[in-house]
Image (cartoon, rainbow, N blue to C red):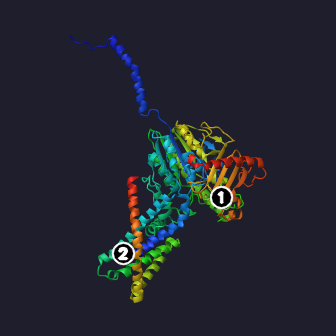
Amino acid sequence: MYGVIILFTYGWTLYRFVWKLPSWLINLTIKEIFIGLCYALTTNLFESLVVLTIILIPALIFPNSKWSLEFVFRASTFVGIVLFTFIRILKNDALINDLPAYGLYAIAATALLQFVLIKLNWFHNLIIGFAERTIVFIYFLLPPSLVAAFFLGIRRLWI
Amino acid sequence: MRKSTSLNRRDILKLGMFAPASMMLSKASQKIKGGTKKLNIIVIVLDALTASSMSLYGHVRQTTPNMERFASKSNVYHSHYSGGTFTTAGTSSLLTGTYPWKHRAINLFGYVTEKYTNRNIFNLLGSEYFRTAFTQNPYADILLSQFGASIDRHYEIDSFAKINLYSHDNNDRVLFEKYIYDDSFLYAENPASLFFGTLKKYAYEFKKDRLMTPANEKIIGGVPRLFFSVEDVFSGMAGEVPASPDSSFVYYHFYPPHQPYIISPEVENLFTDAWEHVNKPIHSLSTNATTQEETAELLLMYERYLARTDMAFGSFINHLEENGYFENSYIILTSDHGELFERGAIGHLTPLVYEGGIHIPLIVHSPGQTERKNFFTPTSAVDVMPTLLSIANRDIPEWCDGQLLPGFGGTEDATRKIFTMDAKLSTPSQELKIISIAMRQGNNKLHYFKGFTDYRGARKNDSYRRGKFELYNIANDPHEITDLLDSQTDLASSMKDSLLQAYDQSKNFNNL
């Protein structure tokens, strides 16, 4: 499930990074771009942990609830819908008055997945399989993020 | 025998020897305490203020009556030019006294080269001045952070503002690139941080909507990321001008009349006149995103916002006058760059170097000055720093491109060449390959465009890539309609040589 969070948070930032890179290559040095990437990875690390914490809290408070018992499916689909909705809001540059509509779509999609589609074994297995495969993103994105955070911390102390 | 306690002649003579020494010590101690008071210097920058929209400079709409009132006791420079076409380049030229091809702060969110972090007015004035800096413009705040080691008090960008979407931390002077990544990337209007960035963006939108009421103010031309009342900021910062007996250098860089234009009820019905902006042909290097009617409407909104800014400036100046600053301070009003509303270009993120974008006000009040003096020969933003250094009895460094302003030891030299340049798309650490340059000499002005390939018109006309010139006589043709390049060939040739020589020298930037 953490892999799903990382897929969306890091994926969005890296997409924006690649979009900005051509202009940065014009007016920034490689060192400055590298430092910017460190800031981005560190921010992604913290925001992914915050999202993870939000998702984990109900499971910790209600360990025997449906949320906890079907945690991987429910948490993965919920966080996927929420973060996908965030992406849609940003891509469409939504006005504040449009946010309730996006919220309703997200609630409807969540309800459909959590109460209806969860009962379909093939769909259930599909989501679990997908969530398991996103674990690979943890392995190759988390270590550089930790290194980036450490690098920025050292830089702040020594400069 | 009792010792005598009365003074005899010998005692009086001995005491008399010490009298001159004691008098000298007394004077010396007064000087050490600051008895010889230096004068204050207060620099006020209004962002994106073009001289062509100011009634002070002859515009028919009465946009700046309070600035005219200030000018009635000041030196007014009628042909003053910014160093660059937008905040980073223009402000850097103002604060370092050098053209952009030297300081290299030429890109959006750019900053001066390391060599120039100490080559600025704050550092050169020295610690004998209490140096205060404030700006509402994040691009300018990056520069102030760069110069931060020489600033005694650096106000936050959101001082006296209502809400702020920027991520600055003025204490983070060394790691100022964090601002760049926060404000231009992670927490930009289209944030790269999916969770934090989206929440921050819409939390700001929600707060802003709650603070504004439909009947109160209208915002034209974009969404402000720093939401403030013009009057609150001006009056707040007026109250912050140091009142200490020591000398102060104050640099206030206000955002108005930069867009978005926040139109208050007091100005929303101004200028309902029949005046029409001169229509000019669409330029090949413009985006041509608006119609002539839309351009005229935006110009009207800009001038209404300028009128509101002028009212706030009037209150600011009243405060200075009532508190004696007109007697003990040099007060300078200027801008970092102008604003274009012509030829298909709106604003200042354009490579065009026509008058609207680079002709800016400069008004300088000297302590006790009661009459206006006018100066018409061209001057540049790079002249402000050396003039201030001269006022403060500091040496003018040899690397400075500017000269003393007329009225402060400088001469009115019609043969002098001054430059404004734009190179937003060039790499600062290399030769500036994509560049626009304006060179003003006397009444003549030469434009030069080189390296442009991506603009609609540049794709059809290869001369914008190879190098294209335009020549105007500003005295006879202030709207720059008639290109004299082919009719005034000798003049054009001479000016081209001068411009290209200056451009060639800029390529050797490591030695500049």
* Residue that badge 2 annotates: A55
Badge 1 crowding class, 10 Å Cα cut-off, few under 14, some 14 to 19, many 20 or more, is many
Q: Position of residue B78 (x, y in %)?
A: 65, 45
Residue in front for this viewpoint, B120 or B235: B120
Is B24 displayed left or right of B115 in the figure?
A: left
Is B267 displayed left or right of B37 in the figure?
A: right
Residue B286 occupies which quadrant of the picture?
Answer: bottom right
Give amino acid for label 1: Gly
Q: Position of residue A113 (x, y in %)?
A: 42, 84
User: Distance between the Cα atoms at labels 2 and 1?
Assistant: 53 Å
Chain containing the residue with disc 1 = B
Q: Position of residue B96 (x, y in %)?
A: 54, 46
Badge 2 crowding class, 10 Å Cα cut-off, few under 14, some 14 to 19, many 20 or more, is many
Position above or below: A116 against B231: below
Residue in front for this viewpoint, B293 or B36: B36
Q: Secondary structure at mark 2?
A: helix
Which numbered circle lies on residue B284?
none
Position above or below: B106 against B9: below
Task: Inspect this view and state whether residue B82 appears.
Answer: no
User: Dividing the image into 4 quarters, which one contains the N terminus of chain B?
Assistant: top left
Residue in front for this viewpoint, B207 or B114: B114
Q: Residue at x 43, y 80 (%)?
A: A107
* Residue that badge 1 annotates: B451
Of labels 2 and 1, the one closer to you: 1
Is B126 displayed left or right of B348 in the figure?
A: left
Task: Inspect this view and state whether residue B508 appears.
Answer: yes
Q: Residue at x 47, y 44 (%)?
A: B131
Q: Residue at x 57, y 52 (%)?
A: B89
